[in-house]
Image: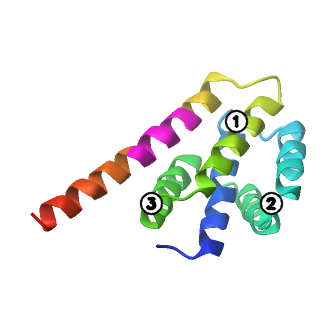
Amino acid sequence: MVSRDRLYQTFGELLYVIAMSDGVIQKEEVETLEEILKGHPKGAVIKWSFDYENKNQNDIETLYKKVIEVFSDNGPDEEYEFMLYALAKIADASEGMNSKEEKVITNFSRDLLERFKNDIEKIKEKYS
């Protein structure tokens, strides 16, 4: 399991991935992100991580793989529901959700679930 702060930093990284999936971060996406994070107890940590990635313009493909690794290491978490909500809101913020943003959200859900299933199978094999 990863630390809670690392988990929230990773949320910021994934939010950066969704915002950059169409090649540019829109003003409306940042405004929506800030509005969503106002109500989250770790909103400042999440926003800091988003801003850090934005400032450094890190590669979103590499970053996405890292996000899946961290979430997989963390295991199932009730915070993922908030994450999916935030992803959808940010994707919808500027002229609606486009196909690239929708693909990121769909892939995130599928990839993470697949990792969890694989982890369960490995545990079963280990103790069988």
What amino acid type is highlighted by mark number 3? Answer: Glu
The stretch drawn in magenta includes residue 105: yes
| Image side of residue 125 versus residue 35, left or right | left
Q: Which residues are magenta?
A: 104-113
Quadrant of the image for the C terminus? bottom left
Residue 64 position (above or below residue 43): above
- Going from N to C along the chain, the mark reached first, 1 or 3, is 3
What amino acid type is highlighted by mark number 2? Answer: His
Give the residue drawn at x 43%, y 66%: 73
Residue 69: mark in rendering: 3
Main secondary-structure element of the magenta-colored stretch: helix
Specify how the rendered protein is coloured: rainbow
Expressed as whole percent of the image width and height from the top left, the position of residue 29 reads 83, 40
- Going from N to C along the chain, the mark reached first, 2 or 3, is 2
Q: Secondary structure at mark 3?
A: helix
Q: Which residue is mark 2?
A: 40
Q: Nearer the viewer, mark 1 or mark 2?
A: 2
The stretch drawn in magenta includes residue 65: no
Q: Secondary structure at mark 1?
A: helix
Residue 38 falls in image quadrant: bottom right
Give the residue drawn at x 77%, y 30%: 92
Pick the residue in front: 5 or 29. 5
| Image side of residue 88 versus residue 43, left or right | left
Q: Which residue is mark 1?
A: 88
Expressed as whole percent of the image width and height from the top left, the position of residue 55 reads 77, 60
